[in-house]
Image (cartoon, grey):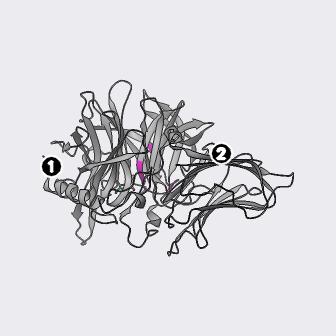
Amino acid sequence: MNSQTLREARKYEEASEKMVTKEERPDFHLSARTGWMNDPNGFSYYGGKYHMFYQYYPYDTVWGPMHWGHAVSEDLLHWEFLPAALAPDEWYDRDGCFSGSAIELPDGRHLLMYTSVLQERLANGGVRDIQQQCLAVGDGVDYEKYEKNPVLTSDDLPEGCSRTDFRDPKVWRKSDGTYCCVTGNRPADGSGQILLFTSPDGFDWKFSKVLAANRDRYGKMWECPDFFELDGKGVLLTSPQDMLPQGFEYHNGNGTLCLIGTYDEATDTFTEQYNQAIDYGIDFYAPQTVVTPDGRRVMIGWLQNWDTCSFRTSHPKWFGQMSLPRELSVRDGRLYQRPLQELDAMRRNKVEYRDVTVTDTMSLDGISGRRVDIELTIRPEEEQLYQKFAIRFAQDEQYHTSLSFRPAESILKIDRKFSGSRRAIIHQRRCLVRGNREELRMRIILDRFSVEVFINDGEQVMSAVLNTEQSADGISFFANGRVKMDIVKYDL
Ligand code: FRU
């Protein structure tokens, strides 16, 4: 039986969604049905479709008591909204249904695992969260909260583990049919750690071990973990709060971290070897992965940064969108991301130029648009390196956003200062491009309100939200020095 709270949310979202036209949303990125969206939740393949749930406050375009929004898709690019799946309607989650994940049970039911939030009053008048892990079981549309919730509480945690910062379970099934989940937590040192829990059936959970400990190296609290094996490696994704920059890594405050190492399934031991940011742009957080029926590990993140949520239009009808789905692989200790292969089927109107010499500002016939897929390769025309190359997009007389590359420093910069923002917040990020500076390859994908740049076959990625008016659809190029450029552009 759906609660009154959930019924109201479903009624409200159905009516409010009608106020947003198709053109007012991204085309192939999932955005909030109405109100506010943050983290991807319960990303899974179930009943022949991909399911994406999300942190959701339907009633306003700011964060509020968390519900789970819900959408389904056959190709991860065209989404259909379903009614909200969870609302904060039980004694243990009355202050929010926080992030979590989903899995199909052997009997065909869909199991959601999420963090329930209950606020307790403190003697000093303040409040503090109690975060516990809960379950809901459903058929892909309606979900019933489990009668034995919460299934993991602070009683299950070893000494010193925070009961206030204990959240975001990501569940998977092991090859022996038993279940594991990882959550974020804070140990006594106040930084982050990832806890591993096991279950024989997905319902009865117990603490197993600390899978990874931050020890104050990468930010503080680690949120939204995901853990999986890929290309023979163990991969841990997490989103640390309060990061300090290290060289050109981790500039985002609320950032992303990928740890790559070895994983021994028999003993559940993860040994770290490599670390990197998942995304080097401005807006990317809390990614979650799914395995496609044909075996690809696909990741989607929240295309947003907590620190730049004031970057918005004056009266938005929705706030929050997801990133493009990205196929992951691990090569030489690095995480690679490629735009989902299904995107190729959306490409139309190919325009191609080879060996264009760029020496100043120029544009090219047929190269413009706000829903485009661009493959760009640049190299020096002569032995002497050029000083700077830039591509500007979402451009008219007043506005533009740019990507500029300085080969001597190997730095690619994204700058949305002139995208129409009236807020003096961070609008730039720099990425130290790895490898060969003689040739830079970029795949740039625009979808009305975003740009995502896949550098050198996805070795690094930069993502950012764009709020520029859609009429600003120009694209131009600039060089200081002599640059040879190949470009292929498709409309999407
Ligand atoms: C990350 C996060 C999660 C939490 C959720 C609440 O963005 O803080 O840790 O579950 O958002 O909306």
| Main secondary structure type of the part rendered in magenta | loop
Q: Please, is residue 150 above or below residue 268 in the view? A: below
Where is residue 312 shown, x and y percent of the image? 44, 68
Q: Is residue 459 visible?
A: yes
Distance between mark 1 and mark 2 Cα atoms: 49 Å
In the displayed structure image, the side of residue 112 where residue 401 appears, left or right: right
Whichever of labels 1 and 2 marks the residue nearer the N terminus, that label is 1
Query: Residue at image x 36%, y 62%?
Result: 318
Where is residue 19 shown, x and y percent of the image? 31, 63
Give the magenta-colored segment's residue range: 212-224
Where is residue 323 shown, x and y percent of the image? 47, 51
Location of residue 75 by image quarter: top left
Q: Please, is residue 105 above or below residue 416 in the view? A: above
- Res 456 label: 2
Q: Which residue in the structure is indicated by mark 1?
A: 2
Say which element carries label 1. Answer: loop
